[in-house]
């Protein structure tokens, strides 16, 4: 009789424990499903501004037109570089006129446009994070540093550019954001803030900075288009030596390269030619220009073989910003552009990947 009671008690306890286990499991599952539903509903109710902040810890700063106008400063290097040809290309007679004109060159970014850009950035970051953590960290870091402003259609002939830590985009970008343009301009912000990150890269790509004015260019440099993302005209280029690849070393000259107006009084910033001027050196190593006929940049064979053709390759800042576009497409496996065969891009890619792996 005692054994029967003991066995009955044991079975009862086991049944209780089993029942309790399944009840707890059911309650946990129900709670989990409820939490997931609530989380899903919460996520669905978030704006893309909220999602960008919650998932990526990023809150984008959008400037209104009055805040953007404060970027235009008479004492900035950009404004100081506005010589007569550059003023003419901007349809102004003097710097004060340009200053007043450019202060009105911005529009407000609408709420709808902000949400569209936040969605674009949210999706772009999600895609990049799945592929390359260092690159994701790099882009996230600089997005936290910048502001966006919207320029009127005529500002810098509609070309996106940067001033201080603000990216000034064309109106169309806010309706149809272009990821390559974003990376191009982010690179200019990086160049402005941490210029030494690019010094060794520029040298590997064959660029040299000369602190002295180049004799013979006194007539040419005033015709160079003023670019806020590449103000200096003291960069020169020579084909770098690359592991005895003689095909790239067919031209050992130094060249000055620029986007030069076609006339002294241009009526548009687009009235330029990308040209290369062959330089000579004296016994002391100083560079000078003997006024040989300019070479159109797309006819400089060694340069094109090394870098490939693109419409914005007249300054090392612009060249590397263009490569930043290519790298984004590379990461996202977008094969539309034929840039893989060019040594210049491969050098950039290796250098950039080492940098972001080390610092980001």
Image (cartoon, helix red, strand yellow):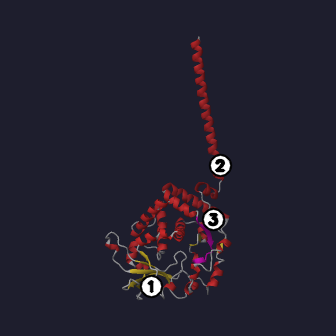
Looking at the picture, how far across and down is residue 151, in whole percent? 62, 73
Which residue is identified by label 2? 41
Observer-nearest of 18 and 141:
141
Q: Residue at x 59, y 82 (%)?
A: 90
Magenta highlight on residue 90: no
Q: Residue at x 57, y 17 (%)?
A: 7
Cα–Cα gap, marks 2 and 3: 27 Å
Whether residue 338 is visible, yes or no, is no
Tell which residue pokes out farthest to the front in this image: 284
Cα–Cα gap, marks 1 and 3: 41 Å
Within the image, what quadrant is residue 120 found in? bottom right
Which residue is identified by label 1? 214
Q: Which residues are magenta?
A: 145-156
Q: Is residue 5 left or right of residue 191?
A: right
Q: Residue at x 40, y 79 (%)?
A: 299
Q: Earlier in the sequence, mark 1 or mark 3?
A: 3
Observer-nearest of 210 and 204:
210
Which residue is identified by label 3? 61
Q: Is residue 57 left or right of residue 230?
A: right
Within 10 Å of disc 3 (Cα), the crowding (few <14, some 14-19, many 20+) is some
């Amino acid at each position: 009789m005692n054994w029967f009671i003991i066995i009955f008690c044991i079975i009862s306890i086991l049944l209780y424990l089993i029942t309790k286990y399944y009840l707890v499991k059911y309650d946990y599952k129900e709670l989990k499903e409820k939490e997931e539903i609530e989380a899903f509903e919460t996520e669905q109710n978030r704006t893309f501004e909220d999602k960008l902040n919650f998932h990526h810890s990023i809150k984008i700063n959008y400037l209104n037109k009055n805040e953007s106008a404060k970027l235009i400063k008479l004492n900035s290097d950009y404004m100081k570089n506005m010589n007569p040809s550059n003023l003419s290309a901007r349809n102004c007679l003097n710097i004060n006129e340009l200053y007043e004109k450019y202060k009105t060159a911005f529009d407000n970014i609408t709420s709808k446009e902000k949400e569209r850009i936040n969605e674009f950035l949210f999706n772009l970051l999600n895609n990049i994070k799945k592929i390359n953590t260092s690159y994701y960290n790099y882009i996230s870091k600089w997005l936290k540093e910048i502001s966006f402003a919207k320029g009127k259609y005529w500002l810098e002939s509609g070309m996106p550019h940067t001033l201080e830590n603000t990216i000034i985009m064309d109106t169309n970008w806010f309706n149809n954001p272009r990821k390559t343009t974003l990376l191009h301009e982010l690179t200019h912000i990086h160049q402005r803030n941490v210029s030494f990150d690019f010094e060794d890269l520029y040298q590997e790509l064959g660029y040299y900075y000369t602190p002295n004015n180049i004799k013979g260019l006194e007539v040419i440099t005033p015709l160079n288009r003023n670019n806020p993302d590449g103000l200096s005209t003291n960069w020169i280029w020579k084909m770098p030596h690359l592991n005895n690849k003689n095909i790239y070393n067919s031209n050992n000259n130094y060249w000055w390269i620029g986007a030069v107006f076609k006339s002294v009084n241009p009526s548009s910033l687009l009235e330029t030619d990308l040209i290369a001027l062959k330089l000579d050196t004296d016994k002391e190593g100083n560079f000078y220009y003997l006024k040989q006929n300019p070479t159109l940049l797309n006819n400089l064979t060694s340069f094109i073989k090394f870098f490939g053709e693109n419409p914005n390759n007249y300054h090392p800042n612009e060249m590397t910003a263009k490569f930043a576009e290519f790298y984004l497409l590379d990461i996202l496996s977008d094969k539309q552009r034929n840039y893989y065969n060019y040594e210049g891009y491969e050098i950039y890619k290796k250098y950039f990947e080492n940098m972001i792996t080390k610092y980001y």
